[in-house]
Amino acid sequence: MQRRQGRVNTGLLLLLFQISQVGLQNIPSVTLGVLVLNIFLFLNPVRPLPEVCISVNEGFYRKNWQRLLLSPVHHADDWHLYYNMISMLWKGMMLEKKLKSMWFAYIIAVFSVLTGVVYMVLEFMLVKILDDPSYGMNCAVGFSGVLFALKVLNNHYNPGRVNSVFGLQIPSKYACWVELVAIHLISPGTSFAGHLAGILVGLMYTMGPLKKIMKACTGI
């Protein structure tokens, strides 16, 4: 097993174990493809993290738009990868079967780009409202924004459920908001704006025009 920064990637090993426990044959094709892509790019990153992360300065001002594609599929460390991909595994298994693989792949592609765009909009607003240019330099990587968007979809298609968020039983329609705040309180270094961007993208799909626009673009 490859090492990063001189240590064993315990999170990666645990992720591979969890995938093996589920069984490759039980994982829908698009979900499996997302897992494989993220694991591959963790072991073989396209560029160093500072050159793939998305921020207002890099994405908007410097026009490095390729970061919208690269930032979601790169992760800061093995545990970042582990938690995101375990979440993707379970959300993907539920949603891909319901939405069918082609449409689910389309959703993943659109959400991956759109969460980055919304993230930059949120950070840009903070720069202007708080008159603090440091928000423009906040650079994010990881799939968690997309996962928050998928969480909104999952709650939309499975209403009335009760989710466990850090041991608290929360109605599904509120779960993503509680998790947003809880993660930020427990791990202040995580990207609050990135997670919020995911929720907003999910709501744009379930309650806004995004789903209709996506269907119109495909001629459905």
Image: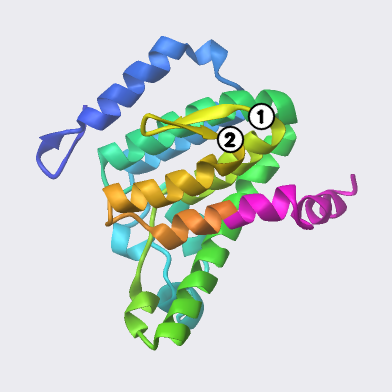
- Disc marking residue 160: 1
Q: Amino acid at mark 1?
A: Gly
Q: Look at the picture and state if 19 lies above or below 145.
A: above
The answer to whether any part of residue 71 appears in the image is yes
Q: Nearer the viewer, residue 120 or 74?
A: 120
Residue beneath disc 2: 172
Main secondary-structure element of the magenta-colored stretch: helix
The answer to whether any part of residue 143 appears in the image is no
CB within 8 Å, label 2 to label 1: yes
Residue 84 part of the magenta segment? no
The x and y percentages for residue 199 are 56, 52
The x and y percentages for residue 56 are 45, 75
The x and y percentages for residue 206 are 73, 47
Name which residue lies at 83% across and 52% down: 212
Tag 1's secondary structure?
Answer: loop
Mark found first going from the N terminus, 2 or 1: 1
Q: Nearer the viewer, residue 115 or 41?
A: 115
- Disc marking residue 111: none
Residue farthest toward the right in the current orientation of the protein: 219
Q: Amino acid at mark 2?
A: Ser
**Segment tinted magenta in the rendering:** 200-220
